[in-house]
Each structure stands twice: as C-alpha cells, then as structure tokens.
Amino acid sequence: MWDQHYNPLGNAALSTIAAAVPVVTLLVLIASGKVKAHLAAIIALVVANVIAIVIFTMPTNMSIRASLLGVVIGFFPIGWIVLNVIFLYRITVETGRFELLQRAIGGVTTDRRLQLLLIAFAFGAFFEGASGFGTPVAITGAILIGLGFSPLAASGLSLIANTAPVAYGALGTPIQGLASVTGLDPYVLGAMVGRQLPFFSLIVPFWLIWAFAGFRGMITIWPAVLVTGVSFAVPQFVISNYINPWIVDIGASLISMGCLILFLQVWQPRELWLSPALRGKDESAATMAPAKPLNTAKLSQAQLWSALLPWIIVCVVMLIWGNGAFKTWANAIFTWNYQVPELHNMINKVPPVAAKPTPEGAVFSFTYLTFTGTGMLIAAIISGFLMGFSPLKMIGEYGRTIKLCAISLITISAMLAIGTLTRLSGVDATLGLAFAATGVLYPFFGTLLGWLGVALTGSDTASNVLFGNLQKITAEQLGLSPVLMAAANSSGGVMGKMIDAQSIVVASTATNWYGHEGTILRYVFLHSIVLACLVGVLVTLQAYVYPFTEMVLK
C-alpha cells in the first residue's frame, strides 16, 4: 500500500506550486500556439509523471500504470463519442441531409445570432442532458461550421454555450456522482444546484451573443435572448426542485427550443445579422473558404423530415442510452471490469481529503454497450441505412473518419492520462486543499475549486467525484452548509467546461480546425474565469447574505 502525500515538500505553498506544474505546462503549451495539442499533452504527461514520482513519492510502476489506465479511459468513453459523432456528421454531409438541415434552420431564421441561440444554446443543452461527455460541443460545432460560421466562432461559441446545462448532463450523472462521494441526497443536491444555475441560464444566452456580435449586436435582439434564457431557466429551477435532477436539461432545452421557435413566428429583428464571423476577430488563418449564402428556399414536409431524421434517431437512442434501467440491464450482461494489477486498491486517500484512509480503485469498466459513443455509432448506422448507405460504403466512410480523428484521439487520451495520474497520485487533492485553506472566503474559492476540477479532468462528474467529499468536509469544519458547497462544486465546475483541453480538442475536431487549439483556448479563457467568479460571488452571497441565505437547503 502507498499513502498519498498532500504536502510532500513540508511547505504548503511549495507543494501547491509543484502540484500545479503539470496543468500549467499543458495550458501554456497549448495557449502558445507553437506546440501542437497532441505534443503538448504528451509533454505535460511526462511532466506529470516526474512530479508524481519525484515530488509526491508515488512508486514508478504505479505512476506508469495510472497513466496507461488514463490513456484507455481517454478513448473509452470520450474519444469513442467524438469518433462516432463525426462519423454521423460525415454521413449526413455525404447524403445531402446536412444541407437540408441548414435550409431548415435558415427557414426558422437567417440571423446568425438567433441561429446561435437555437443551435449552440438550446439544441446543445438537449444533447448535454441526453449524453454529455463532449457530445453537445461536437454536434453543435459541426452544425455551425456547416452553416458557414467561422472555425473560431463555431468552436468558441459552442464551448461558451455548453455551460449552464453541464451540471445536469447525461441524465443527471454529475449529481449522482456528487451524491455517491458525499452521502448527500441527490434530490437535495440537484435542487440546490437548481437554485444557483438558473441565474446563469439567464446570463449565458446574453453572454453568448455579446461574445459573437458585440453589445450593440446583442441588444438589438434582446427580446429573443430573454425568451431563450427565461424559458430555460424557469424549467431548470422547477424540474430540479419539484421533479428530479435526471431530466432537467432534457425538459428545459425542449421548452426553450419550442418557445424560441414560436416567438420567432411573431417577432424578427429589424436588421438581420448575416455574417458568420466573430465581430472584430482576424481569422485569416482559418482553413475554410468564405461562407456561401444560405439557400433558404422553403422545404417540403418530406425534405424537412429527411433533414431531421438522423437527429431524431440520435435523440431517441441517446434517451434510451441515458436511461438508468437500460444501463442496469446492459451493464449486467455486457461488462468487463479490469482491475489494474499493482494499482487497484493499492493507494490510500487519507485525511483531510478523506475521513479515514480509503483505498483508491483503479478499474477500467469496459461497459461497451452502454458507452454513449456506442449509442451514437448505432444511431449513425441506423441513419446511414435509412439514408441509402450500403454496408461497404459505410465501412469506408468510417475508415476515413478514423484517419481524420486520429491525432485528436491521441490528444484526448494523453489528457485523460494526466487527469487519472494526478487524481491517483494526490496532486489534485493538494490543489484542492490550497483552496480549502481560504477560510471565510471559502464559498468563493470552493466554487473555483469546482471550476479547476473540470478544467483538469474535462468532466463535471469527475470533478464532483474528485472534490465533492473535500467540499463537504471543509464546509462542516467552517460551519457552512455542506449541501451548499457540494452543489457549488458542480455549479462552479460548469464554467470550467469551456477551457478543459479535452473539450477544446473536441471542438477543433468537430470544426476541422486542427492545430488551432491554442487560439480557441485564448478566446474562451477570459469568459470562463469571469463566469466562474460570478458563480463564486453568488455562492458567497448564499453563504452569508440575506435573503440569499434563504435559498440554501439543509
């Protein structure tokens, strides 16, 4: 057995700096734009191993095994999702269905700002609720690039939009993960998150359009933005507090899409915004040709259903794949659990991160049928057959998709290896304890801890599992509500989703903008940290200031 060490240098500040080196290395290399994302991830992984072995005294064989486990986890399930989403997208392009989808959306509105509200925010929220784990960014990014949006706009704006729904993603998986490590009621946790995020469900649509079109471009369509935000925020609060935390995103996104489409039947902006490029951004490095004018000729009913068919199939399959009963049945039959030798239960998480010494599991659960990517592959195959693809042609297209995504899959696997290694070595916990030492300011910095967790792991679920119990323990020591701080970990984490390296690679892959991950990171970083700080301010008010304290559940 090996016990994790959270202050290996005997000085909290120095140990925290050492713990931060791997993630800082990764972000700096990517942001520099001079190092390809896959090389940056590999370099950062090497640095993480050196820190874990030399500074944190993790046995070398454990460090290497943890890294290899992370590589596999990076492909299953994350890379598996990306690969099959892009496969579906390429099938729709090859069959002409994607052009029909463009025309269908153009039939609702040709205004680029309103298209962002409909696709990036509302449609993306549906896929976050149905499957999560990178699916919404991949799908909305691909749709936006197909509609003629510039690569940076399609990537960056999809990431900004995919924030408010993340805490309830994949049918409430982050909430369930938080409940599993804290012992708190998932319904209470989901309700508390539902008293934090609706404020930002109102803000994010305005923020999204402001980021794209500037203040004047946003203010001229404020009625539509308000309708989108209110029709998402109100159901988000109601469903999370009075029904359950599993269907929050599904219900809120469908209501938001419906309300926006109905509103646009009676209201349109005086001036249409037809440019797909980000306001004030030089995109001379873009790898795509200038956007062609959209063909907005009205579709027949048959054409409309043909355009929507692949996405309807995806929605149905994703709802089945996210259903708890289906997962329980399928996992009981189609599961292979591999316990990594000399790593599984050989590492102890110790106080103050855990209440008592607790072995860390190191199991690769190959639940191959219930992987979200498997559901996406099945949806793509069904769609391909219904659209006239032969099996041989489909295999050929899949081979081309693998070639297209190869570098991105390597990058994602290397990044997940960093996250797995830092978790098992205790490096992440050292960073978490630094936030926990902020005393009366802990509600603010504890929220940023959730943001950091998602930035490190690429998943709100993983961040909740990593830091959820630490949030609970620290809150109890400081006399704060453990429900408040556990929920803050999830709510703060959603703003880290736009800067985690995994999501950025997914976005660059979906938009065919390879090698520009640094550009995307630089664009979204300020948005991410400012929004995370605003969540921290709200949580601080809920901790100390009336009437916000009345919102806190016990």
Image: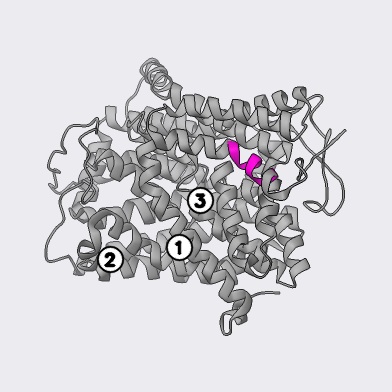
Between 165 and 267, the one lying in front of the other is: 165
Q: Secondary structure at mark 3?
A: helix
Between 191 and 12, the one lying in front of the other is: 12
Q: Tell me the CA gap for discs 3 and 2.
A: 32 Å
Which residue bears the numbered disc 1? 252
Which residue bears the numbered disc 3? 496
Instruction: Say if mark 2 contacts mark 1, CB within 8 Å.
Output: no
Can you see residue 552? yes
| Residue name at image x 17 percent, y 53 percent | 110
The quarter in which the C terminus is drawn is: bottom right
Q: Residues within 10 Å of mark 3 (few under 14, many from 20)?
A: many
What is the three-letter code of the residue carrying label 1? Ala
Can you see residue 375? no
| Residue name at image x 54 percent, y 26 percent | 43
Q: Tell me the CA gap for discs 1 and 3.
A: 22 Å
Which residue bears the numbered disc 2? 262
Q: Is residue 135 magenta?
A: no
Residue 261 located left or right of residue 266 = right
Q: Residues within 10 Å of mark 1 (few under 14, many from 20)?
A: many
Which x, y percent locates residue 396? 38, 16
Which residues make up the magenta segment? 15-21
Q: Secondary structure at mark 1?
A: helix
